[in-house]
């Protein structure tokens, strides 16, 4: 059911992952999937183009309300109020604009290692950014959070599941985060873009299902874009579960027509008709996770992710710092994410995007092993 196009076709893609690579290089960087689109999504996009239907999006459609609440209920055990959904063009811009509403110029924190645009774009948007270093076992550091709250932190951006570690935060940890943020009257923006991609063995807990404190002090953001490879279509959702949070969202500067119409149509279809494709994807990612565990070259270690298609690889045993990604690009012709983009201290790390077929992943691992052997 899932097909990866041949490399010569992938290299014709114009998206970030596959453009700008030197000849022969395999892209395994930015979080895009190599698989062909789910066929119901491809069909709805083709039909829209055939109709010449590329105008402004009309706002949250009844179809999207029904599709997303159904998906959340079926797959995430999350009862979403269909009247508390708001469209934004993307999760990142939604997070930044919510921070502007909640804490203009104030202190905003997130766990590091973290998604690189948090490190770059939040300071550029004028916030005093606080890096909450994850513990050595990748768990969230609640003591550190409490200290930052005491010091005036206004907003915590919580990537759940986390990128780049792929960790799924357990309910007890989420409850504690909600409690301590409520105590200091701070907000949590739960970035749940990777939630549809929880792999076998882990259980995702939606932020807005955690507790009353979480609902009063939190806002969730999500999108079909990571799970269904639609990032270029610019359509994401902000979800609330309290009047207090809805009041905040009403102050966002967006109008609904700033999202992409194709993104809206694709999201409706993904959430309503994408289950079979998503099941096949999750099964493939699970097999890929096993493959990496079996074939990771000596000297590289990892904690297998509980969600998504990102491997946070520790290359400390190889002595390739400060830039193991540059080594693998040069010697293996494999483009990986540089650890220091996720955390200035993570110079021994690389991030491997394993959202590809088993054969392609095998080639990536073979190339890395051969480069190390020579
Ligand atoms: C944790 C996290 N948040 C946000 C995004 C970006 O989402 P969007 O393209 O909707 O801004 C990503 C993309 O990989 C991500 O990993």
Image: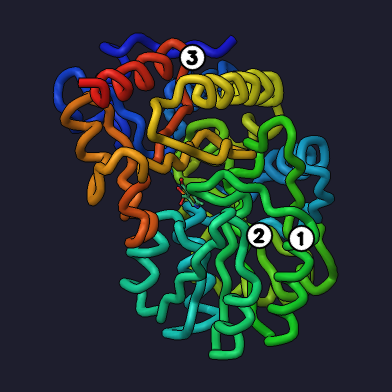
The colour scheme applied to this rendered structure is rainbow
Q: Is residue 12 left or right of residue 75?
A: left
Disc 1 + disc 2, Cβ < 8 Å? yes
In percent of width and height, residue 300 lies at: 41, 35
Up/down of 265 relative to 321, above or below: above
Q: Is residue 28 left or right of residue 295?
A: left
- Looking at mark 2, is its residue's CB closer than 8 Å to ligand 1? no
SS under mark 2: strand
Q: Is residue 244 left or right of residue 151?
A: right
**C-alpha distance separating marks 1 and 2:** 7 Å
Disc 3 + disc 2, Cβ < 8 Å? no
- Name which of mark 1 and mark 2 comes first in the sequence: 1
Position of the N terminus, as image quadrant, is: top right
**Which residue is tagged 1?**
208
Number of other residues with Cα within 10 Å of mark 3, as a class: few under 14, some 14 to 19, many 20 or more: some
Frontmost of labels 3 and 2 is: 3
In which quarter of the view is residue 179 placed? bottom right
**Which residue is tagged 3?**
358
Residue at point 79%, 38% (across, down): 70
- Name which of mark 1 and mark 3 comes first in the sequence: 1
In percent of width and height, residue 136 lies at: 54, 57
Up/down of 143 relative to 292, above or below: below
- Name which of mark 3 and mark 2 comes first in the sequence: 2
In percent of width and height, residue 228 lies at: 55, 31
Number of other residues with Cα within 10 Å of mark 1, as a class: few under 14, some 14 to 19, many 20 or more: many
**Which residue is tagged 2?**
220
Disc 1 + disc 3, Cβ < 8 Å? no
Residue at point 84%, 50% (across, down): 79
């Amino acid at each position: 059911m899932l097909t990866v196009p041949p490399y010569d076709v992938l290299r014709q893609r114009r998206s970030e992952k596959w453009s700008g690579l030197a000849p022969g290089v395999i892209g395994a960087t930015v979080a895009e999937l190599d698989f062909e689109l789910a066929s119901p999504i491809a069909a709805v996009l083709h039909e829209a183009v055939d109709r010449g239907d590329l105008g402004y999006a009309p706002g949250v459609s009844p179809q999207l309300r029904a599709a997303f609440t159904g998906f959340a209920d079926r797959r995430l055990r999350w009862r979403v109020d269909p009247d508390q959904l708001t469209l934004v063009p993307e999760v990142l811009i939604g997070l930044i604009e919510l921070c502007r509403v909640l804490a203009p110029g104030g202190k905003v924190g997130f766990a590091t290692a973290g998604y690189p645009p948090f490190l770059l774009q939040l300071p550029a948007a004028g916030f005093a950014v606080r890096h909450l270093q994850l513990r050595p076992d990748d768990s969230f550091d609640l003591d550190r959070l409490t200290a930052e709250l005491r010091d005036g932190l206004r907003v915590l951006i919580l990537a759940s599941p986390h990128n780049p570690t792929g960790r799924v935060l357990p309910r007890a940890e989420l409850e504690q985060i909600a409690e301590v943020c409520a105590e200091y009257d701070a907000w949590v923006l739960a970035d749940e873009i990777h939630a549809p991609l929880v792999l076998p063995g882990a259980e995702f807990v939606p932020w807005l299902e955690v507790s009353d404190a979480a609902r009063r002090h939190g806002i969730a953001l999500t999108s079909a874009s990571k799970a269904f490879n639609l990032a270029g279509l610019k359509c994401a959702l902000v979800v609330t579960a309290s009047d207090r949070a809805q009041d905040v969202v009403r102050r966002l500067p967006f109008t609904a027509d700033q999202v992409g119409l194709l993104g809206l149509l694709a999201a409706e279809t993904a959430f309503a008709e994408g289950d079979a494709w998503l099941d096949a994807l999750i099964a493939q990612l699970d097999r890929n996770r096993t493959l990496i565990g079996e074939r990771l070259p000596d000297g590289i270690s990892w904690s297998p992710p509980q969600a998504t298609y990102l491997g946070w690889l520790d290359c400390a045993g190889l002595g390739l710092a400060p830039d193991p990604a540059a080594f693998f690009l040069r010697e293996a012709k494999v483009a990986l994410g540089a650890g220091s983009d996720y955390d200035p201290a993570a110079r021994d790390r690389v991030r491997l995007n394993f959202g590809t077929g088993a054969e392609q992943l095998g080639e990536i691992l073979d190339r890395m092993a051969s480069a190390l052997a020579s």
